[in-house]
Image (cartoon, coloured by chain):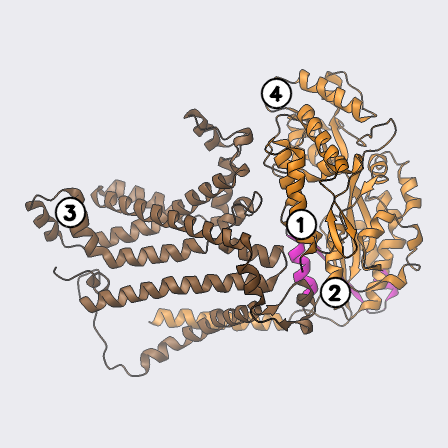
Chain colours: A brown, B orange
Amino acid sequence: MVQPAADLTGVRPNGAPVRRIRRAGALPYLLAAPSLVVMAFLLGIPLLKLIQTSFQRFTRREFFNPDEIVSVGLENYKAILTDDSFLTVVWRTLIVTAIMVALTMLLGTLIALLLERLGMVWRTLVGLAMLVAWATPAVSATQVWKWMLNSQSGILTWLLEQIGVDLRGNNAVLFDAHKVLAVIIVIIVWQAVPFVALTLFAGLTQVPRELYEAAKIDGASAWKTFWNVTFPMMRPIFVLLTTLSIIWDFRVFTQVWTFNRGGPEQGSLLLGAYSYFAAFDQKNFGQGAAVAVIMVLITLAVTAYYVRQLVRSGETS
Amino acid sequence: MKIRRLIAATAVAGLALTALAACGDDSDDKTLKVWLMRNSLPESIVDDVKKEFEDSHDGWKVKVEYQEWTDITRTLDKGLGSNNPPDVVEIGNTLTTGLAAAGALEDLTDKTRDLKGEDWNPAMTETGTYDEKLYGVPYYGGARVVLYRKDLFAASNVQVPTTMAELTTASEQLMADNVGTTDFSAIYIPGRYWYFGTSFVFNSGGEIAAKEGDDWKSQLATAESVNGITAYKEFADTVSPNAPKEVNEEDPPQVNLLGDGKSAMIYGFGWMIGEVEKAHPELKDQIGIFTLPGDTAGSAFPTFLGGSNLGIAAGSDKKDEAYDFLKLLTVDYQERLVNEAKLIPNNMTMLETAKQDPVLAPSANAASNGWVTPSSPKWSEVESAQVMQDLYQAVLSGQKSPQAAADDASARINEILNKQ
């Protein structure tokens, strides 16, 4: 294997290798300092506050009377970890995240491969169409989907009816938590695919043509070429995108809340929205914080895995 | 790199400016901050109250800030919990006990006599009371009435009904005469319209929840309540078989259905006439209102008694002035609230007068048989979890039997109201 994929990130678009600055002294740190300070303030302090809150009894009472705040140790964690509804939400979130990430990666890959084979005009058109989906704010996008699926006047309801799918009356989407989740998955994937597809497409353009020619001469099928040439070359990008997708999809909040506030009967709540629901709707900020801390830990675990993968692929080069 | 530095520097500078701006915020010693709900009062009344207060309080100014109903619980929490809270605040009556229990409001019990509390509408007083102390002073009430299309009534030759039975018969006639209109409802009843359904619970002698000792116990699964829910289902199946079951009365707004002729009647507020006429000028004078009738002629069906209380923030440092302002609105200006704003007054004497006012009569009559939500401070959490909406949706759609749905809702309500 010539030049495994680590180079994909170490090569500039014009093909010139990145110049390594070995002895720059303190200058890079100095230059990074302002943004690091801002980050520390904007991310660090809220995070510390969040962790602190998760160990406190902090309900509406304490919100108005800060002097009554008391530390309760692991009480909040105990309460949510023994709560069946929380565990249900965790399982639901894991399953839904897995489906969303798998669909995003699959569709993203297919569209990237399509883009590579399209001519200039169509490539631009498809790219633009995807940018529009990507750029639509999540709240508006979700609201539009909600209108399109209205059981009486929605255009999608009508279209689906033409092919025999009945979403009217008691079959309405908002009635059934599974249907609500299915639509949320569609909305998320629809907005996530563009980034994945465009990034993968950018990666594809960096795979040396000679490898494909060699594969062709060897008589490899398209399927084999993908698995033996494209995929290994692009592995770091796949790992990066999958990890990012997991992190993003795992924390999804806006679409869940805007579409149906986690209803009916809290049946479509995912972890991100559950944390909000516990803190702001049920007015238990301590427990909401504990849920959020657990989410941060899970996200950190995924990130740690990703960093390890990146470091590893760096070592093999 | 230059660009990054620039961005970082801009961010820092931007943040610094924000901080400075925050320091420069008003918190004038002699400015009274008042929060009212948007469009609850005509501008003219607000201006006069302000003027009267400023005239009698030398050097003082009143700053009125209008709030929106959307996400109002969070707005109130944020405002009352801040370092510079509103001194006087209008609070939807179902939200008052929650704020009182959390210690956000000033105890006003010893002012009751000064505010002529002996004449208050008892149901309104109940919404402002927590633990036998008064935190929210009854301000005004609101009660739903039936808005109807006079033209559709005339076309079907039906009269304004005086009993529930007559309403049902009239609705059957309207349904039959309007089969040509897609998704027509005689009275529009979407599945998640919980104020409508709960009125049936109260009409059959049931209630939402009652306090037993230190605990709250849901009463939705009792025989009386389930009878009410069953009657509601039969009623909705007759008068509104085509309405969507997965939405509430605001999404889409029910006034649209009335205006578009998709519904001959809606259960809403008197002021909605103006909204219909604004969107449909051709319907001017074609929208009438009447009190939702009870089972016997001349009686009113139970109706949710909405409206607002006025409270004083516990964190206010201008409590005396805040009280003076509160008293103006709840005592001195009540008559103008009734006559000009067409609101239900906070006291029984004026309520009797309001029943003579042709515009106010339907809602004043409805308000005399009003029900309120349980006075538990955790009630707003039941509303946030949409337990009642889920209950009626499940019943009207036929997904669950009335008893099964009531059992499920009871379990959720008991859990929320009694949790630590």
Q: CA distance from mark 4 to mark 2?
A: 53 Å
Cα gap from disc 2 to disc 3, whole angstroms: 68 Å
Three-letter amino acid code at disc 1?
Val
| Pointer 4 residue | B181
Q: Quadrant of the N terminus of chain A?
A: bottom left
On the same chain, marks 4 and 2? The answer is yes
Seen from the viewer's position, the closer of residues B200 and B262 is: B200
Residue drawn 82% across the image and 69% down it: B59
Answer with the quarter of the image where residue B208 lies. Answer: top right
Is label 1 on the same chain as label 2?
yes
In the image, residue B35 lies at what x, y percent?
A: 73, 58
Residue A225, numbered label:
3
Give how far apart the Cα atoms at labels 4 and 1 are: 37 Å
Residue annotated with mark 1: B382
Give the residue pinned by disc 2.
B103
Q: How many marks?
A: 4
Label 1, label 3: how many angstroms apart (C-alpha)? 58 Å
Q: Residues at marks 3 and 4, common chain?
A: no
Say which chain tag 1 marks: B
Residues at discs 4 and 1 in contact (Cβ within 8 Å): no
Please check whether the numbered discs 1 and 3 fall on a single chain.
no
Camera-nearest label, 1 or 2: 1
| Magenta-colored stretch includes residue B400 | no
Do the dots labelled 2 and 3 sit on one chain? no
Callout in the foreground (1, 3): 1
> Can you tell which of label 4 and label 1 is closer to the viewer?
1
Contact flag, marks 1 and 2 (Cβ < 8 Å)? no
